[in-house]
Image: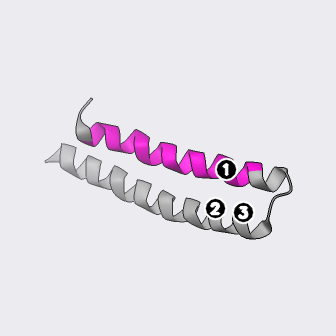
Amino acid sequence: MTFSGSLVPVAVGAVAVVLVLGLANMLRGGSAGTSQKLMRLRVVLQFVAILVILFVLWWRSG
């Protein structure tokens, strides 16, 4: 697997980890502030993951 091909699973994995952490915090009755921070981080990571995917598609097309 190339470097650009390994970026996509890392980006998607980061989103999944933050999502699971946020859900776990919410289900165990953790702080609402922590859940909000984790969900905001998830949105940012999703944006980054989309940018990474678009970059890899652009890179491979050229």
N-terminal-most mark, 2 or 1: 1
Q: Is mark 3 on a helix, strand or loop?
A: helix
Amino acid type, mark 2: Leu
| Picture residue at 81% right of the left edge, 59% below the top | 30
Q: Distance between the residues labelled 2 and 1?
A: 7 Å
Give residue 21's mark.
1
Which residue position holds label 3?
35
Q: Are marks 3 and 2 in contact (CB under 8 Å)?
A: yes
Q: Is mark 2 on a helix, strand or loop?
A: helix
Q: In this view, does 39 lie to the left or right of 14?
A: right
Give residue 51's mark.
none
Give residue 38's mark.
2
Tell me if residue 14 is in the magenta stretch: yes
Q: Is residue 37 left or right of residue 8?
A: right
Q: In this view, does 12 lie to the left or right of 18?
A: left
Vertical side of 43 occupied by 54: above or below: above
Toward which corner of the image does residue 22 lie, by quadrant?
bottom right
N-terminal-most mark, 1 or 3: 1
The magenta span reads 4-24
| Picture residue at 27% right of the left edge, 54% below the top | 55
**Residue positioned most to the right:** 29
Amino acid type, mark 1: Leu
Q: Do the residues labelled 2 and 1 touch (CB within 8 Å)?
A: yes
Vertical side of 15 occupied by 5: above or below: above
Place of residue 4 in the rendered image (x, y in percent of width and height, measured from the top left): 26, 42
